[in-house]
Structure formats: C-alpha cells, structure tokens
Image (cartoon, helix red, strand yellow):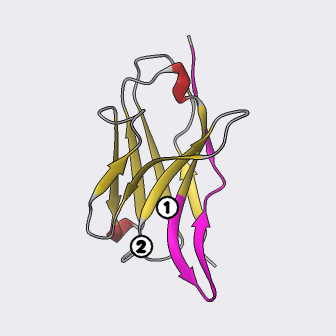
C-alpha cells in the first residue's frame, strides 16, 4: 500500500499564488505523478501530470499558470499555482500510478483550495 499526503491548500484571493505538496510513503522513481481536482458538482479532472522522465502535461484551463514538478529524492510532487482564479476552487488530489500487486494507482486524501475575495 502507498500513502500520498497532500498539503498546502488554503483560502487565497484571486491573483495570488499557492504551492501544493504531495509526499509519498515510498519511492516515486519510475512513477507518473499527477494532480487532479474536483469542484462541487463536477467530475474529477486532470490538472497536470509529470512523467518518469520529467515531461509535463497540463489541462488547457491551467496552462501557463500552473507548474508541476517532482523530487524523487524527497518522494514528492509539487504543484505551483500562479494567478489563481475563483474557478480554480476545488479539492486537489495527488495521484501516482504505483503498481501494487494486482492494482495500479494511489490517491491522496485531497487538500482544499479556495479562491475568493
């Protein structure tokens, strides 16, 4: 079993920046890491992901504003969010495509980000 622990979510004003951190209970070497979000009444959506080799991909809604990074030594993934907008309000989840026996994929418990005046 792999545990993912997110942190960093809080209430911010529009235009501000925020950093989310995800720490895994075991090595993330060879693991694709991602950040998803789910707003009230909406489906969970992929925000950003980073491959084993460091290639990144972003949803159109955050491209140019968010940056995903990873530190294998720290077993951590980061989401740097700039110029936050009210529509970025959601619970943000960390994901890693860990292989655990016959199952694949581990999720964190989520961290709330609220963007409001």
Q: Residue 93's x, y, as percent?
A: 58, 50
Residue at mark 2: 31
Mark 2 crowd level (few <14, some 14–19, many ≥20, 10 Å Cα) = some
Q: Which quadrant, please, contains the C terminus?
A: top right
Choose between 60 and 76: the one closer to the eye: 60
Q: Which quadrant, please, contains the N terminus?
A: bottom right
Q: Residue furthest bottom?
A: 101
Depth-wise, is mark 2 or mark 1 nearer the camera?
2
Q: In which quadrant of the rendered view does residue 40 lie?
A: top right
Question: Helix, strand, or loop for circle 1?
Answer: strand
Q: Residue at (49%, 51%) from the top-left corner?
A: 35
Mark 1 crowd level (few <14, some 14–19, many ≥20, 10 Å Cα) = many
Q: Residue at (39%, 36%) from the top-left corner?
A: 60
Mark sitting on residue 55: none
On screen, 1 above or below 42?
below
Q: Residue furthest right?
A: 41
Q: Residue 43's x, y, as percent?
A: 66, 43
Q: Residue 111's x, y, as percent?
A: 61, 44
Q: Is residue 96 left or right of residue 111?
A: left
User: Could you tell me how far apart the alpha carbons at marks 2 and 1 are, in whole angstroms?
Assistant: 13 Å
Choose between 96 and 21: the one closer to the eye: 96
Residues shaded magenta = 95-116
Q: Residue 28's x, y, as percent?
A: 42, 73
- 32 magenta-colored: no
On screen, 78 above or below 43?
below
Q: Residue at (57%, 16%) from the top-left corner?
A: 116
Q: Residue at (34%, 51%) from the top-left corner?
A: 57
Residue at mark 1: 23
Chief SS of the magenta region: strand
- 103 magenta-colored: yes
Q: Mark 1 or mark 2, which is nearer the start of the sequence?
A: 1
């Amino acid at each position: 079993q792999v545990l993912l622990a997110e942190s960093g979510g809080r209430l911010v004003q529009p235009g501000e920046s925020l950093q989310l951190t995800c720490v895994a209970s075991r090595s993330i070497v060879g693991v694709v890491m991602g950040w998803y979000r789910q707003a009230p009444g909406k489906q969970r959506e992929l925000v950003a992901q980073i491959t084993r080799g460091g290639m990144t991909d972003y949803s159109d809604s955050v491209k140019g504003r968010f940056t995903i990074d990873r530190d294998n030594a720290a077993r951590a993934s980061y989401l740097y969010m700039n110029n936050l907008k009210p529509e970025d309000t959601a619970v943000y989840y960390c994901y890693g495509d860990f292989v655990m026996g016959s199952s694949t994929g581990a999720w964190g418990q989520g961290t709330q980000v609220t963007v409001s005046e």
